[in-house]
Amino acid sequence: MGGQTIGVVIPARNEEAHIGTVLETLPEFVDYAVVIDDGSTDATYKMASKASSPAEVTILQTKGLGVGAAIDLGHQYLLKTIEQPFVSAVMAGDGQMDP
């Protein structure tokens, strides 16, 4: 994609059934993925940790901040982590958005 660095923020709450597929089907041009496990009571964290992804994946755990705050946290993480200009996108953790 023209050499652009791409980061994806993925808020997720109780998405153990879907988060692995979401991460595994990210397009090859995605460089970074940040999953925000926002207060899940299921195995979302475990499934995200086990998933194989073309992107460098980071999983942040919170205590149910809400989707808006989770997205903001993910963007803040990308801003601190990526040391060059980048493009970011948001994808839901439930697999309803076609990557």
Image (cartoon, helix red, strand yellow):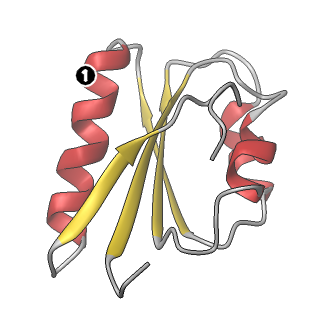
The total number of labels drawn is 1
**Quadrant into which the N terminus falls:** bottom left
- Residue 70 screen position, x and y as percent: 33, 27
34 over 36 or under it: above or below? below
**Rendered position, 97 above or below 8:** above
Disc 1 marks a residue whose amino acid type is Ala
Image quadrant of residue 20?
top right
x then y, percent, for residue 35:
50, 44
Q: Position of residue 2 (x, y in %)?
A: 37, 84
Q: Residue at x 22, y 33 (%)?
A: 72
Counting from the top left corner in percent of width and height, residue 52 is at 78, 66
Q: Residue at x 31, y 43 (%)?
A: 74
In the picture provided, is 34 more to the left or to the right than 76? right
Name the one closer to the observer, 99 or 15: 99
Indicate the quadrant where residue 28 lies: bottom right
The kind of secondary structure element at disc 1 is helix
Find the residue positioned furthest to the bottom.
Answer: 3
- Classed neighbour count for the residue bearing mark 1: other residues with Cα under 10 Å, few (<14), some (14–19), many (≥20): some
The outermost residue toward the right is 17
Note whether 31 is above or below 35 in the view shown.
below
Residue marked by disc 1: 69
Q: Is residue 66 left or right of residue 78?
A: right
**Residue at 66%, 73% in the rendered image:** 54
In the image: residue 39, left or right of residue 18: left
- The foreground one among 13 and 21 is 21
User: Left of 50 or right of it: where is 4?
Assistant: left
The residue located at (71%, 24%) in the rendering is: 15
